Image (spheres, rainbow, N blue to C red):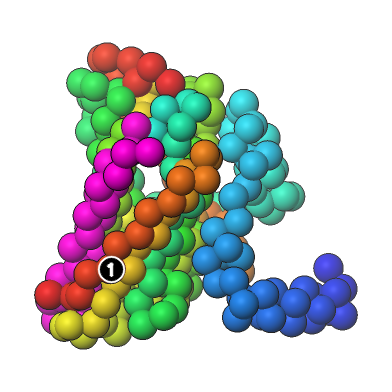
Amino acid sequence: MSLSRRTILKSVSGVLALALPSAVLAKWPQTAFESKNVEAVLKNLYSESEAIESSDITIKVPAIAENGRFVPVEIETTLAKVESISIISEINPVPLLGEFKFADNVLPWIKTRVKISKTGNVIVMVKTNNQLYTARKQITVNLSGCV
Amino acid sequence: MARIRTRILSRIKGDVTTVKALVKHPMTGTHFIKEITFEHQGKVIMSANWGMGISSNPYFSFKFKGGNKGEPVKLSWKDNKDHTGEIVKNIK
């Protein structure tokens, strides 16, 4: 991206952010949610950014989920300047589960519950101010999340 | 539509405020929350885009610095049928 375009985008988003904070920050990425596989999700969310595998991302999930409709997920990272975290289930028909955007005073930690349709990997993407990182963890699902 | 119950609890320990939120919502493939936003002192501190893959009656927790007892934290959400909800509760 050229510097001038960047500057324009920055100033435009700055103006919009003042007028419509929540609408801008939470712009729903429709094509990413409509993507049917992990590659398409990543391309839609992060365009061509290369993700670095990171051991500084901790994904806490049960090794065996009794009920795939309610799988607790806790994500923490020691990476600095985290801007967003996305949770993806590679096996779900709609792989993108959620995208979470952090202000700079929010700690890089989240906890939620997700649906996992069957045994497979949960993939976490962490975007910092200058790099995309990733980690994954396998979950065995006994009762399908029916998603 | 029936009133959807939304709950939020923010508790401070040291300089870290932990926010826990629970929204009563079906979260099916045809009816799900798309956007959820948290504001502290009028500033958006956390916003999330969700799909149908978040469990029904979504639970979400995060932590932030810079809060003080008595200050309001506001949660607002919007689903794919343009239903909305919000709740404001002070930090305990």
Residue at 69% across / 44% down in the picture? A44
Q: Which residue is mark 1?
A: B88
Amino acid under label 1? Val
Examine the rendering and report whether any part of residue A73 can be seen.
no
Residue at 17% across / 83% down in the picture? B70
Q: Look at the image and tell me in which quarter the C terminus of chain B lies.
A: bottom left
User: Which residue, as the protein is rendered here, is positioned at the far front?
Assistant: B1
Examine the rendering and report whether any part of residue B75 can be seen.
yes
Q: In the rendered image of this protein, does residue A83 appear above or below residue A52?
A: below
Residue A120 image point, x, y percent: 41, 23
Query: Dividing the picture into quarters, in which one does residue A15 lie?
Result: bottom right
Residue A14 image point, x, y percent: 67, 80
Q: Report in which chain the residue with disc 1 lies.
A: B
Callout 1: helix, strand or loop?
strand
Q: In this view of the protein, which residue sits in the foreground, A8 or B74?
A: B74
Residue at 33% across / 68% down in the picture? B74
Q: In the rendered image of this protein, does residue B1 appear above or below residue A15?
A: above
Q: Per the image, is B30 magenta?
A: no
What are the residue bounds of the magenta stretch? B1-26
Residue A110 image point, x, y percent: 32, 55
**B52 relative position to B23: left or right:** right
User: Could you classify mark 1 by the number of other residues whose Cα lies within 10 Å: few (under 14), some (14-19), or many (20 or more)?
Assistant: some
**A114 relative position to A125: left or right:** left
Q: Main secondary structure of the magenta part?
A: strand
Q: Look at the image and tell me in which quarter the N terminus of chain B lies.
A: top left
Say how many tags the image has: 1
Residue at 33% across / 15% down in the picture? A144
Query: Dividing the picture into quarters, in which one does residue B87 lie?
Result: bottom left
Q: In this view of the protein, which residue sits in the foreground, B58 or B63?
A: B58
**B29 relative position to A12: left or right:** left
